[in-house]
Every structure is written in structure tokens, then in C-alpha cells.
Amino acid sequence: MVRLATRSDIPQLVELMREFYAESSFPLDREWAERAFAGLIDKPSHGAVWLIESGGAPVGHVVLSVRFAMEFGGLSGYIDDLFVRPAHRRQGAASAALDALFADCRRRSCRSVHVEVGPHNTAANMLYRRYGLVPGDDQRQSLGVVLQPAG
């Protein structure tokens, strides 16, 4: 089952995020993660978070961020996180989560959906291809910088 997350789900979401980050040996600042989930849940215009459950227990989550993209002349969805606990993979949980995310993007009239995935993550690439997400052919690369708060 996939359902929109609420503030009461934040502790479970942070634990799922910790497991997700641990798979790539990334540390997780729990307080930062709590604030990030709360900020998104409290501002649905910025996106959404879904909790994936099996037998009433959390087994994963997916995060949608939304922005206006000049390239597409409208809103663009971004799959910010998608994680399913290993014991529940390849059982349809990620597909159910993406179904919910894409339905929400259509409701919002998003003109595109994007995701970042490593080229060697075969399972994720196969999943995303089923939803039409494929590498661009224009040689662009994703660049970024972390900004410090003003003040």
C-alpha cells in the first residue's frame, strides 16, 4: 500500500532515509532530515512524500519535488528519493510508489518528470525506463552547489 505521508510519519521516514543513505555510505543528519520532511509535507505545492507499507509496516518511501521549468513551459516533477527495503524489492512496491507519484504529477499538470540514477544501477534504470525515464541524448550533465543560509 502507498499513502501520502503526514507529519506523524516523519520518524519512520527518517529511519528509511537513514537506511537508504547507508547503502551508499552517506551519513544522515537526523535533525536536518526531520526538518526537510516537515518542510515538504507542510508545503504540498513544493511536492509530496509517500510512505510504502506492507502489512501495516513501513517498507519504503518516495519523494516528489516540484519546480517550474522554463524548458517545458510549466511544472516539472523530480523524483528526489525512492527507497524500498531490500526484503521488499522486486515485489511491486517501487512501481506502486511511482504510480502514485506519476498520478500526482498528472494532477498537478507537470510537463515532465526527472530522476538522477547511477548508470550502473541496473534495477533502478530498468524500473525508471518502464515509466519513460531515459538518459538524455544532449550530453548535458547535472551540476549543483549547496548554498549556506544568508545571514
Image (tube, grey):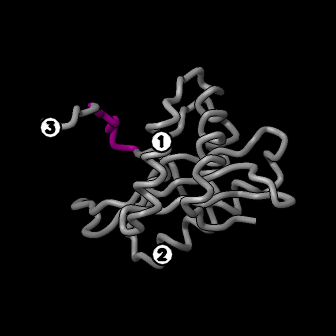
Q: Alpha carbon of mark 1 to alpha carbon of mark 2: how far?
A: 20 Å
- How crowded pointer 2 is (Cα within 10 Å; few <14, some 14-19, many 20+) is rated as some
Q: Which comes before the other along the chain, label 3 or label 1?
A: 1
Which amino acid does the dot numbered 2 rest on? Arg
Q: Using the image as rendered, state which of residue 9 and residue 117 is in the foreground.
A: 9
Q: Residue at x 63, y 35 (%)?
A: 20
Do residues under tags 2 and 3 come within 8 Å of each other at their CB atoms?
no
Is 74 or 104 nearer to us in this picture? 104
What label does residue 116 carry, if any? 1
Q: In which quarter of the image is residue 89?
A: top right
Q: How far apart are marks 2 and 3 (CA)?
A: 35 Å
Question: Which label was assigned to residue 106?
Answer: 2
Q: Report x, y in % for residue 79.
A: 49, 52
- Picture quarter with the N terminus: bottom right
Q: Are marks 1 and 2 in contact (CB under 8 Å)?
A: no
Q: How crowded is mark 1: few (under 14 residues within 10 Å), some or many (20 or more)?
A: few
Give the amino acid at mark 3: Ala
Q: In this view, does 142 lie above or below 97?
A: above
Q: Left or right of 148: which side holds 133?
A: right
**Quadrant position of the C terminus in the picture:** top left
Q: What element carries label 2?
A: helix
Q: Mark 3 points at which residue?
A: 150
Q: Earlier in the sequence, mark 2 or mark 3?
A: 2
